[in-house]
Amino acid sequence: MPQYKVAIVGAGPAGYFAAQALQNLQTDELKFSIDMIERLPTPWGLVRSGVAPDHPKIKTVAKVFEKIATSDGFSLYGNVELGTDISLDVLKAKYDAVVIATGSATGKKLGILGEELPGSISAAEFVPWYNGHPDFANHEPNLDCDTAVVIGAGNVAMDVARMLALEPSELDATDTATHALEALRNSKIRKVVISARRGPEHAAFTSPELRDLPKLEYTNVVMSASDVSAALERAGAEPEKEVRNNLEAMRLISELEQGKHARTMEFQFLCTPKEFRGNGKVEEVLFNTSAGEEKVIKCGLVITAIGYVAEPLAGISYEKGKVLNAEGRVGENLYVVGWAKRGPSGVIGTNKSDAADVMNLLVADMKEPKPSVDLISLITTNKVISQSHWESINAAEIAAGEPHGKPRIKAVSREELLRLGGL
């Protein structure tokens, strides 16, 4: 019976859903051997290093990933970097198909004056920092100021703002990285402004995220009633369902009682950032309002959350921050799924249908299977994380968290992760 060999590069949601789609396409006549390659010692991608720690329900999709990973014909190769430990050309030569599922990890730039000042960072640095990503564990955001500005109008911007505006004790029962929890406990930030260029009716927040905000126990959530009523007027009598739900959630926020708490999260709309200013560090942000006026907010930290672009890989063409592709086809026996394919859009589940569509194309393109391949013999590093190594890391982190009422305490250095894995 022919068995096709597929290499998937990237162990995040898009990669696992691509593997699941292939597993679902198997028949008595069609079998797949799947090798998943991941740069980090840990899999799960944004489910581990992107989802906000205070939203644990979203992380339960990891149970689906583990079921995929323990199915016949699946192997994990963690701590293996494409282009360093193995080349794309080797994978293409040895495998019947190669699937790029590397996501989009670099924050987009505003391209304005002062963006490079200390105190100006991207959500692409801040989010993995509080989530314990090994590459960002030593990052030190400036929390020694009373006001922070978050620029963006999507769920990432809201996650970032919420993490800054929460009373840190609310994170005690989460898997927030230990170093981040300590820094947030010592934070002097008491006001966080989320600034959107367009009006509330155009915001990319999702309504469940907005509806959660009034539940914050120690934080005032402020939204102008006039902003919301003007947005309702502009949206017209029959706005799309998502817009209607968002504006209803925003209306409820605008009616909240204010001033009860020492911490505040405030939304501002129709303000375009023009310049970050300060003497050797960010001290204020200059905005242009929709009325043509200038507005200044004094602050010591600015976090931009305006989208992501894919980190380029050698041998692959990119355009507008994503892999150049035709419905997921990149070239001969080369495919792309997830954010690397379509840009940073949708929720985690969006990757499922997207991956299934591309895997159908992959199967339709299949020719005669190539000879079997022993990937481990082609990899230059001798510290490869297998599924069993990862299960040891996972069990150790969960055991460390249990006495503290946490789902896990993450190891954040590569060295510690490899040690926990037995390497």
Image: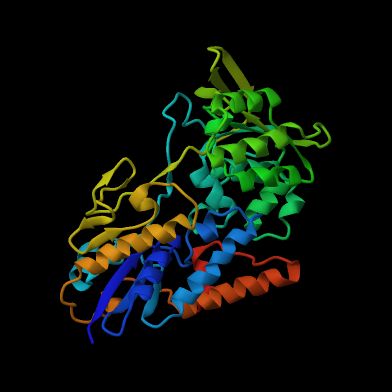
Q: How is the image coloured?
A: rainbow
In the image as oriented, which residue stretches furthest toward the front? 237
Which x, y percent locates residue 335? 27, 60
Which x, y percent locates residue 248? 66, 37
Residue 133 visible, this angle: no
Residue 3 visible, this angle: yes
Relative to 317, 386 lies left or right: right
Relative to 74, 229 lies left or right: right
Relative to 340, 411 lies left or right: right
Residue 72 versus residue 146 in the image, above or below = below
Quarter of the image for residue 213 reads top right
Relative to 334, 123 lies left or right: right
Quadrant where the image shows the N terminus:
bottom left
Residue appearing at x 45%, y 74% in the figure: 68
Which x, y percent locates residue 160? 60, 43
Residue 189 versus residue 356 in the image, above or below = above
Residue appearing at x 41%, y 59% in the figure: 353
Which x, y percent locates residue 349? 48, 58
Q: In terms of depth relative to the viewer, which is nearer, 358 or 77? A: 358
Q: In terms of depth relative to the viewer, which is nearer, 246 or 236? A: 236
